[in-house]
Amino acid sequence: MKTHKSIVYDYFIEKFFFFVGLSCLLVLFLIMLFLFKEGLPIFAKVSFTDFFFGMEWYPTSENQRFGVFPLIIASVSVTLIASFIAVPLSIAIAVYMAELASPTVREIIKPVVEIIASIPSVVIGFFGMVVVAPVLQRWFDLDTGLNLFNAALMLGFMAIPTIASISEDAISSVPVSLKEASYALGGNRFQTIFFVTIPAALSGIWTAIILGVSRVIGETMVVLMVAGGAAMIPTSIFSPVRPLTSNIAAEMAETPVGSSHYHALFAIGILLFCITFVFNLIADYLSNKYKFKHN
Amino acid sequence: MKRKADIIELIAFALIKVFSFTIIFFLIFMLGYIIKSGFSALSVDFFTKMPENQMRGGGIMPAIVGTFFLMLGSAIVSIPIGIITAVYLNEYAKNPRVVKIIRLGINNLAGVPSVVFGLFGLSLFVIFLDFGTSILAGSLTLGVLSLPIIIRSTEEALLTVPPTYREASLSLGATRWQTIYRIVLPNALPGILTGVMLSLGRSAGETAPIMFTAAAFFAPDLPKSVYSEVMSLPYHIYVLATAGLHIQETRHLQYGTAIVLILLVLLLNTTGLILRYRLRRKF
């Protein structure tokens, strides 16, 4: 019954829900606030250029050095190689799910992809450490199997669910009329998929790739356990490296609160936050701008 | 001409299938290998005993208990806020710009690296609010991390409830809150539970956010209050596998812990996915 009381009640609930609804923005704001509060003081001690382009990371030696350039290069190279592995595999599985698989096979593959998404990263890191690393070491006759390539392999595997499921959505939402037009012109299924459907879904696929790459950049446990941990510019695909995320995770526990080292690690956090923030904004922009209108 | 196109099609489709099945094969191999290697470590004692002999023997009971508390704590934080946010966005919000900004916030929150959540939890909860390395600080950190998961699943669930249900309720004179509480939420419940399950699975498996906010390498006692440090399953795997002098000796315990964590996460996720599937069939 719509009594006076229940209408007033309704009004206050709406206001309450609105304020709770803002909590995600509040959290995001607090994350930025505290990262900057704890990270910016390092730049009073080390210049911007020395921090981002310095080649030496010796946070605990007598003569402290806070140059994160080798860590940035490590993150970039791991991410690039992981993407080279993940993108083709993910798009293949997306095309398979959306266009080729029979309904039964699709009902099997979809949960498999979701299971991959749910496996904790520490388990994947553990697997890379104890199973993949010795194999790589033996096959390629390396000093250590914990290296850039191993990390990229594991991260590529982890990125597949993100890229595949969003790409699949994009491919499935391409209007049937476009495909029918292609068939009517004599295109076979392959030509239709690769020259009509995929180009039409490209913005969605880009969104998927950007979100997948953003996840790879931010992933911590896998690179912490598998990448090898050497803060040097990699010289080959099998060099041990120390990406930004693993550097924070490895050093934060032993760092005195309020020291330069502590501030430097938060400054790396700012960098990571900004990179993933920009990637997410781009993904958001793409997915809003070119979304197919369902009818 | 026609023939060449057909051959290309054959090759391309074969490649797509090979790629797809490679991924499935890799997943099965990984899970199978871990289960095969750790199966011998599983026993009743493994689940019910404290670690013994400097972590070289005994069980992982405190890590299971710790993970349970962290899951519970993060659920208390994220479930009410997440559901209310989703209900606001779907049922109340009128201003599309406000909705857009909140959605953007949610998407960006979902993209924040887990280690950055760890830094955030350390600086705000552990140090600034002085909770110390504790269940409380870890739960709050994991709670905000899993917010986007609950919000998205709840929104998806609310969207599956047909508008006609709402219209029928409103036309009978119910207020919007009565409609939401009596009609929309009960019908969306399975989908909301999906979100709850997925976010519990995420909280159970995350390591980086609790490394500096909640996790202890070894705790001699079970946690006494929300201000206690705890052991947890993912951190236990990480520590045993990377630190200390007995990495090789504890290998079977590492595999065993990994099996327990995988089973826990898979159980939560499959329950969530089954609920979602049933909700989709309902409407």
Image: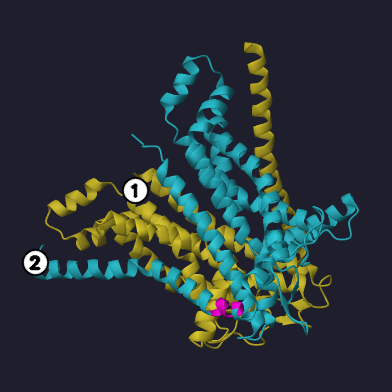
Is B239 on the left or on the right of A105, as rendered? right
Chain A drawn colour: cyan
Is A187 on the left or on the right of B154, as rendered? right
- Give the residue type at disc 2: Thr
Residue depicted at 72% across the width and 74% down the height: B239
Name the residue beneath numbered marker 2.
Answer: A3
Q: Kindly identify which numbered label has been placed on residue B160.
A: 1
Secondary-structure class at tag 1: helix
- Give the residue type at disc 1: Thr
Chain B drawn colour: yellow
Is A169 on the left or on the right of A133, as rendered? left
Residue B63 quadrant = bottom right
Is B124 on the left or on the right of B1, as rendered? left
**Along the viewing direction, whichever of B21 and A39 lies nearer the viewer:** A39
Question: Do tags 1 and 2 sit on the same chain?
Answer: no
How far apart are the alpha carbons under marks 1 and 2? 30 Å
Residue depicted at 22% across the width and 51% down the height: B166
